[in-house]
Image: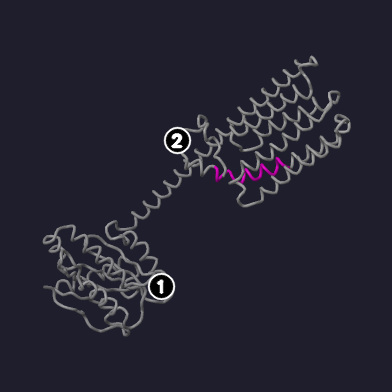
Amino acid sequence: MERPVGRGAGMWKPAGFTPELERDFQAELAPAKVRLTRMTMLMALAMNAGFALLDPWVLQSALTQAWWVRGVMSAGAIVCYALSFLPGFPRYYTASVAGAFLVLGSGVLGLIMAASPGDLAYDFYFVGLVLVAMALHVLTFLNVVVASACSLGFLMVYLVIAVTSQNYLESGTGAVLATNMLFFVSIVAIAIVGQVVRDSYARENYVLRHSLARDVELKEEAHRRALWIAENDALTGIGNRLHFEREGARLLVDARQAGRMAIVLFIDLNNFKDINDNYGHAVGDRALRFTAEQIRHCLQPGDVVARNGGDEFVVCLVRDDRETLAMLAARILHRLQQGMRIRGKVIEVGASIGIACAPLDGDTLADVLAVADREMYRIKDQGLHGYSLSESLRQHDELPQADVVALRRTS
């Protein structure tokens, strides 16, 4: 399993970079790891082949061994390149990439060890070892501790080879060895600093983008919430007057274009003040939510319902068959009269409903709503729970002819 970058060396992580953010960061980094691994392994293959062309001039004493070593180095790069196409490669990124670089570095060390004292390969391929160590830090996303351990290992093995196989201390070339060691350490130190700065900036950039994305998300959510509040009633969850004016006007236009009638129902609860006075405003609020829910259950998709204010509700819909209006109003009243259970007692919620339509009662929503409002008061003033059709609707051939339809008288 891949060890997250920076674990054990959190001093260069941005403040507040939590383990959860680290996991998300590593997940986002996965595609870049795959791309960089493939590019690095292709570069390693190309450079290995390029250096192989120089073997006949700089490694004449062990040419056959050199080609075998280069074959192993190429195989390591090819295996790592192939592994990058596996779906689970990011989980095993550290083992795969570090393993490939260990093969490449060990191969270069093997070439150096195989060289005779008179061959140029010993000093020539030291540069190749430096390139491998530097690539560990700048061309991978390895943990800086893992990469540094590999580089230090290369340096220690190189030192052992110099002292034992090449006899640098006995041949009086210790200054060359010291220079090479200092050069190697300096290059690796620069590479480590670059890796640390890159990783730190990468995390800071991720935190910044994460924060910006979160800010945008919060602003969008606040905007959506503001839009919802602007057109919805917070208590009942249905539309408010603004919503009804906009959507009702749209329905009127649609009905006019289709040659149909747009119907408006004005619903006012009866004795709502008594519910508030006798049971408290919390029960009154429940009665309003109960009313909104019962009305909504009687409607179809596309119908518009809203709380007009107080205990008034309005509905706008498109209907033109003979019995639908009467059945809809009766269904709403029936559901309301089933009542709601409060403290073991059923409280009935009665209502008076006025019904008008466009274009018979007006061309605008305000005109039709005014007629429906008047019809609602017409039945309420008679002390009835029921509904009343506008005069235009009562005279319409395809609608009921009754003046006022009362389900029962108010108590």
Q: Secondary structure at mark 2?
A: loop
At 71% across and 46% down in the image, what residue appears?
Answer: 79
Q: Amino acid at mark 1?
A: Arg
Q: Residue 71's quadrant in the figure?
A: top right
Q: Residues within 10 Å of mark 1 (few under 14, many from 20)?
A: some
Task: Identify the colour scheme used.
Answer: one colour
Which residue occupies 21% across, 81% down? 403
Residue toward you, 335 or 120: 120
Indicate yes or no whether the magenta region holds residue 288.
no
Magenta residue span:
26-41
Q: Residue 16 bears which disc, if any? A: 2
Magenta-span inclusion, residue 29:
yes
Marked residue nearer the N-terminal end (1 or 2): 2
Left or right: residue 154 compared with residue 275: right
Residue 317: image x %, image y %?
A: 35, 72
- Look at the image and tell me in which quarter the N terminus lies: top right
On screen, 306 above or below 190? below
**Mark 1 = which residue?**
256
- The residue depicted at 68 percent of the width and 31 percent of the height is 134
Residue 81 vs 243, above or below: the answer is above
Type of the residue with mark 2: Gly
Prevailing SS of the magenta stretch = helix
Judged from the image, the secondary structure of the residue bearing numbered disc 1 is helix
Instruction: Locate residue 282, reporting x and y percent.
Output: 19, 57
**Whole-number angstrom distance, CA of label 1 to CA of label 2:** 60 Å
Left or right of residue 117: residue 340: left
